[in-house]
Image (spheres, coloured by chain):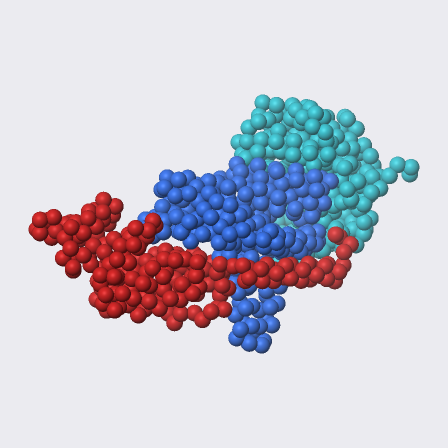
Chain colours: A cyan, B blue, C red
Amino acid sequence: MSQPYAIEVIEVQKRYQSGDFWRPIKAQALRGVSMQVRPGEVYGLVGVNGAGKTTLMKVMTGLLRPDQGQALVFGLPAGSMAARARFGYLPELPSFPKYLSAREVLDFYGRLQGMEPRARQARVAELLKWVGLAEALDKPIREYSKGMQQRVGLAQALLHDPELVFLDEPISGLDPLGIKQMRDLFLSLKAQGKTIFFNTHILSEVERLCDRVGLMHRGRMLLQAPVADLASRHASTVTLAFRSLGPAQRRSLKAMRLVASQENQVWTVAVANAQLAPVLAKLKLPRGAAPTVISANSPLETAFIKAVRAEEQG
Amino acid sequence: MRQSWVIGINIFRQLLRNRILTVLAIFALAMGGLSVFLGELGQESEARLGRDFGLLGVEWIGYITVLLCHVVLLFEETELKTITMLLVKPVARWQYLLGKLVGSSLLAALNVAGLVLVLLLVGWARGYSLASLPFFLAAFFLLWQSVVMSAVVLLFSVLASTVPACVVYSTFTFFLGHFTGNLVEWMAKLNEGAALVLVRVLYYLLPNLAIFNLSDSLPLGGENIKTGIALSAASFLWPLAYGAIYALAVLLLAAWQYQRKEI
Amino acid sequence: MERLPLSRLLLIIALLLLVAAALAGIARQSRRDQAELPLAFLTPAPPKLSAFGFTGALAGMRRVAADWAYIEMLQYYGTGRNRLDCGFQGVIPFAEEIFWLDPHFRFGILYTAAILGFNEGHLPEAISLLQRAARTDPGYPRYRLYLAGLTYRKAHDNPRALQILELMVQEPDRPEILVRTLGNLYIKNKDWPKVRAYWRRVVMTDKDPRTLWEARLALAQAAQHGY
């Protein structure tokens, strides 16, 4: 490959340390994670809370140093000054000095990027207009809503027009209108050909925006694939709940390669949408014993649930 | 260094607009009021009392300013995580720390200047003048002491993970720092062997804040507070140099530890 | 910074701290040579040293501690019932503390010496204080003037003592208490024109209610004698 990956993570391990320096608290956050992101790609990293997504992003941005392994950004060591000049970062729930205005905050970050005054002023005005904050740019940030602060955060990440943008839970805590506004901005960035790497636990956004997706669970990368592949390989499923399943019915399910699990005297089975009618027909359930649909999963959800269950059982 | 200056100015601006300044402004006014009150108590020594307690107020406002600055910044870093967006910019961590020192020192300078102005106005209203070179020199060196203490508070803000711990360690050091110089003399006089060794170790580690208090050594004048004997320039250079080198040592340790800190 | 090993860092810091300590030592030495105030405990402390005085001396805040002792002395002397304490004998430890903390606190020393010697009759303590003050601060002539006044009082040479007091009262920035002291001495000497002259000054300059009451009483006595 002639052009380096936009992001390359090689067997990264990280044991997280917190607390006072004489009394540290340690937890294994990353266990040998490897992944690559190509330039121009939109990559979504999903996982439950505590899976290690934010820790991995901090390693990639240089905020944390891995205990083992390596993270590279455009072939440069993550955290190096050269690497930092090529990406922008929006943390989860970004916070700004309350008494400064958006213009002042962006001007400050622009100075740190070494931008010349005129170029900086023009870029700040342009970005604030692009994120829809032109009317509020001189108001103190303490008067901003969460969505507005998120947009200021996005603007600061794009100030120096980076090739790569890291977004950590960018739609977390936003209302539906805020989510739509952010989504439109991301689509605009995608259209500009930027590489976007974002963390989320909202699969629907991954399905909408991403080219590739990775699933993390308990510090490991369980699954990485193009979104289109996962959608074609896994069907939408429903989860059925039965009050009772006799031995014959359980044998039928096993023959159809379906797993029934029991909890609190209720049996549950995940069945592909397309197979629902044939399965019910083969079970020959008595009258009044029809199952209840307790959840419906998209292909991505189905893939992830399978991967997580396999990890937990194996 | 340019990055540190940019960060320092930004910190100065954000803290200036923070309500933290209201507390300090109230303190400055309270010191002015205390000067008047003590002047009433002290009768004919009003000028001397106004000057001496005024300088005590200058010392305190300088320390409280830098302490509050770092407390607010530490809170924002740990609770609000404002630091993450800054540290992914092309800024070295030591530049960020130096910027905090610059910002807090600028705010301390502003507050000290404000308090000195309040004291001058109180004196003028009460019929005496504090405006003299020795007085301004004494105030300047107390400000320099605040800069040194800012470096110390900065170190504790890096070492301690909570705000209360930072406040306790810093204030403890602030108090102890006034005693160490004289303690060494005292212990030597008493020939206490093991205790003398312990005190000497503490003396090297803790800041010697008595060095910056020129009140006790500058002839600020007995009856006539306007005249003063000129001390040699070297007398002023040593505390300046001491403060700079001590602050540098503290900053080095803070920068090294901060480099390793997980954000 | 990142690649600097801990051992090398500690060595650099230790060197810097040593240099800093050397500079501090030079600064202390130069202060010792030129300083107004001696460093703590180089001279023996008085037997009754308050906690504030002790702390102030140790913390390099002797001037402020001396001011505080002075204020406390004024508060003590301003409380009438302390007269029962063998004629405000409690002023003596305050005087010693003020002098020990700041031997250059001229006004405080003169004021306390005046109270002890001219008002309350503690002549030996007042004379001792002024003699030590004059030795420490030989450039200040008022100590010798006050000493002269007290010496004449001790020798019961009232006319000479009064002459010295008259000189003291002419000085600018003298303690106002001297005017009252002189006024009381003239009442004892029944010199009514002078009683009227000095107590009228007190009425015009003092705001303390008790002092004003005392002044009006003295003026009434003078008036009874036709002045």
Q: What percent of the width, then of the height, locates residue A184?
A: 68, 26
**Image point (62%, 41%), residue name:** B8
Q: Nearer the viewer, residue C55 or C100?
A: C100
**Outermost right residue:** A2
**Image point (72%, 26%), residue name:** A119
Residue C224 lies left or right of residue B129; in this view the side is left
Q: What percent of the width, then of the height, locates residue A67?
A: 76, 55
* Residue C85 in view here: no
Above or below A173: residue C71:
below
**Image point (64%, 53%), residue name:** B241
* Residue C13 in view here: yes
User: In the rendered image, which quarter is residue B107 located in?
Assistant: top right
Q: What percent of the width, then of the height, locates residue C19?
A: 67, 60
Residue C96 lies left or right of residue A220; in this view the side is left
**Image point (68%, 54%), residue name:** B252
User: In the rendered image, which quarter is residue B234 located in?
Assistant: bottom right
Look at the image and tell me in which quarter the N terminus of chain A lies.
Answer: top right
Above or below C13: residue A79:
above
Residue A254 lies left or right of residue C128; in this view the side is right
Residue A63 lies left or right of residue C199; in this view the side is right
